[in-house]
Image (cartoon, rainbow, N blue to C red):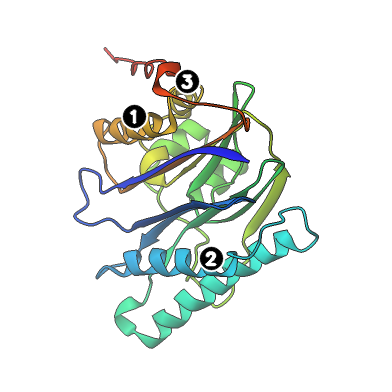
Amino acid sequence: MHLAVAARTDTGRVRKGNEDTLHADANAHRGIFIVADGMGGHAAGEIASEMAVEVVTRDLSELNDLETGGASEQVAEALREANRAVFERTRRELEKAGMGTTVSALLLSDTHYIIGHVGDSRIYLVRDGEMTQLTRDHSLVQEQVDAGLLTPEQARRHPQSNVITRCVGMADEIEPDVLEGEARMGDCFLLASDGLTGMVEDRRLHQLLTSRAAPARIVDALISEANNNGGNDNITAIVVRVLPQESHHTDRDITPIPPARVNG
């Protein structure tokens, strides 16, 4: 397995602190990539996202064979354990009441991927030039989209677009979404908090992710665009590209980042 990976988080232009936490790591068998977007006052969101990432990475550190029978359940249980840890802390420390976090985790090998997901951080897959959102937002506006009451574009601009219906730490028990699929050479995955996806439209995400730019340059461009569009929230992005073993990806192979569309 050969992966080209870049990961970065940014406070944005409005928030004073950053409550997002990311994790990006790989061994010879598989990579683990996580975005967690915390919420809650008195820095509680930062604590919740850090706790969740720590628990999930710890519990999945020995999971190397993603095609084994119990792998998906192991991912689900790691998210449940993270939820129990965060929820129990809200019960012990009254000032942490109401804290929680999204968690979107991708485990990836050269043949398989498994995703565990709670909240409205997202994971996208670009394959053969087509981009697909693999996760489904656990949010109020997504429920209205599913019911046919809002279009996806209306949901993006809705005043309650940040209201989520499921997160780690919300209740004593949660049920995460878990999905898995085949991984292929050439696949490109994006993990993103809503500080990115709420500021940058999917068509622009698609344009950047299908460019031949290195993942680090794509991540920088994504965060710059989110900030240029307002930077209303913390912004986190992880880009993972699955490369052939013999690939030698150098700057000489890179084409420029496509320019942003100018309105007006």
Sooner in the amino-acid sequence: mark 2 or mark 1: 2
In percent of the image, x 19 and y 55: which residue is there? 16
Label 2 sits on what residue type? Val
Residue 54 in percent (x, y) is at: 46, 67
Label 1 sits on what residue type? Ala
- Mark 1 Cα shell of 10 Å, populated few (<14), some (14-19), many (≥20): some
Q: Nearer the viewer, residue 20 or 40?
A: 20
Residue 211 numbered tag:
3
Residue 101 in percent (x, y) is at: 43, 62
| Residue 53 appears in the figure | yes
- Whether residue 182 sits left or right of residue 84 in the image: it is right
Separation of marks 1 and 3 at Cα, in angstroms: 11 Å
Label 3 sits on what residue type? Ser
Q: Which residue is mark 2?
A: 56
| Above or below, comparing residue 10 to residue 129 in the picture | below
Sooner in the amino-acid sequence: mark 1 or mark 3: 3
Separation of marks 2 and 1 at Cα, in angstroms: 28 Å
Q: Which residue is mark 1?
A: 221
